[in-house]
């Protein structure tokens, strides 16, 4: 009997298609605490303005799902050994969520808040759960989260600021061999305050901020979702957030200034309208002139 060929069968393709069909909209309504530690200010600005579709393939969507499932598993592991984890709002039943008090659009959801960790039983900790490749895991063990994964470190600093706690517990599962890494992180007010100001600048800048890469061949740009846009190879997606007439307000809303100023919902923002005019700095052409009264840019 001949061996069946090893290949991507219709069943596998159907499974992948299912992930693509169920994929959530990549356009989150706010700037997240989970990304504020990114190095490139322009990348953050493009993210917040929904400039590019990352176009995640099914394999990556499954990888994200694996991370979410591991988070639940870790929480159950912690509870099973007597550590108390609060992972849901007692009133709404939703995931714990915080917003920046000074201005709108900067938010984040916590994995949980825990107490009765053996290292400090009476101290409440922000809980942050992650999964990692073996390479990054080994780097974490050697260097600690602040040096090995600064973006995660920044995320916890913001959560501690918002929750008014001064400790976080960072736990990582190695995807290659299921090892667990744990680290207690201290609150650094200076870092947290600096990140808040960084978020303020990203949110309220009317134009793209400075880029990190020096050329399109820069290794820091290689895996960026916005590389083609940043190096003038394409235009951004059409939505209210790439339009000259939209403004993020301090109260957390977005307004349209074309005609009588009005608040636009997140649904409307994603749809855009027939009067959309790109923010000039997003177009790889020279700005000749603008007529605000006529609503035109040349």
Image: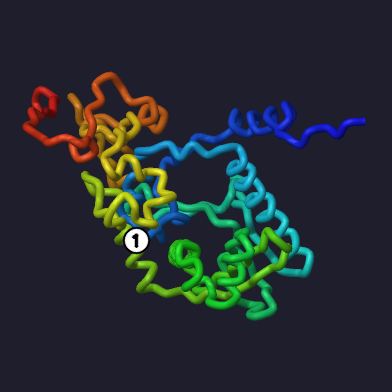
**Residue at the farthest bottom position:** 119
Q: Quadrant of residue 243?
A: top left
Image quadrant in which the C terminus is located: top left
Report if residue 98 is visible in the image.
Answer: yes
**In the image, is residue 52 above or below residue 187?**
above
Q: Where is residue 159 in the image (x, y as percent from the top left)?
A: 48, 62
Q: Is residue 247 left or right of residue 20?
A: left
> Which residue in the protein does label 1 denote?
196
Judge by depth and name the residue closer to the eye, 66 or 254: 66
Q: Which residue is found at the position 66% from the left and 55% from the top?
A: 71
Q: Where is residue 91 in the image (x, y as percent from the top left)?
A: 60, 48
Report if residue 93 is visible in the image.
Answer: no
Q: What element carries label 1?
A: helix
Image quadrant in which the N terminus is located: top right
**Residue at the farthest right position:** 1
Q: In which quarter of the image is residue 138?
A: bottom right
Q: In which quarter of the image is residue 142?
A: bottom right
Q: Which residue is found at the position 63% from the left and 52% from the top?
A: 67
Judge by depth and name the residue closer to the eye, 201 or 109: 201
């Amino acid at each position: 009997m001949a061996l069946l060929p090893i290949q991507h069968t219709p069943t596998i393709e159907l499974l992948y298609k299912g992930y693509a069909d169920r994929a959530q909209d990549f356009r989150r309504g706010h700037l997240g605490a989970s990304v504020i530690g990114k190095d490139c200010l322009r990348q953050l600005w493009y993210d917040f303005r929904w400039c590019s579709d990352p176009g995640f393939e099914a394999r990556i969507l499954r990888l994200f799902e694996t991370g979410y499932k591991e988070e639940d598993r870790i929480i159950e592991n912690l509870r099973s050994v007597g550590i108390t984890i609060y992972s849901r709002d007692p009133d709404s039943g939703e995931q714990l969520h915080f917003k920046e008090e000074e201005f709108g659009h900067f938010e984040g959801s916590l994995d949980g808040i825990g107490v009765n960790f053996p290292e400090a039983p009476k101290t409440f900790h922000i809980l942050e759960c992650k999964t990692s490749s073996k390479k990054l895991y080994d780097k974490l063990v050697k260097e600690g989260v602040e040096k090995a994964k600064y973006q995660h470190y920044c995320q916890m600093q913001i959560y501690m600021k918002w929750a008014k706690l001064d400790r976080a517990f960072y736990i990582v599962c190695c995807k290659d061999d299921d090892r667990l890494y744990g680290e207690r992180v201290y609150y650094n007010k200076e870092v947290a305050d600096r990140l808040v100001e960084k978020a303020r600048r990203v949110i309220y800048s009317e134009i793209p901020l400075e880029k990190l890469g020096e050329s399109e061949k820069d290794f820091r740009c290689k895996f960026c979702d916005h590389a083609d846009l940043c190096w003038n190879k394409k235009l951004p997606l059409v939505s209210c957030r790439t339009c000259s007439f939209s403004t993020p307000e301090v109260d957390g809303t977005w307004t349209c200034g074309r005609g009588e100023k009005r608040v636009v919902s997140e649904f409307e923002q994603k749809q855009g309208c027939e009067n959309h005019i790109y923010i000039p700095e997003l177009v790889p052409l020279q700005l000749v002139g603008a007529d605000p009264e006529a609503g035109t840019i040349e």
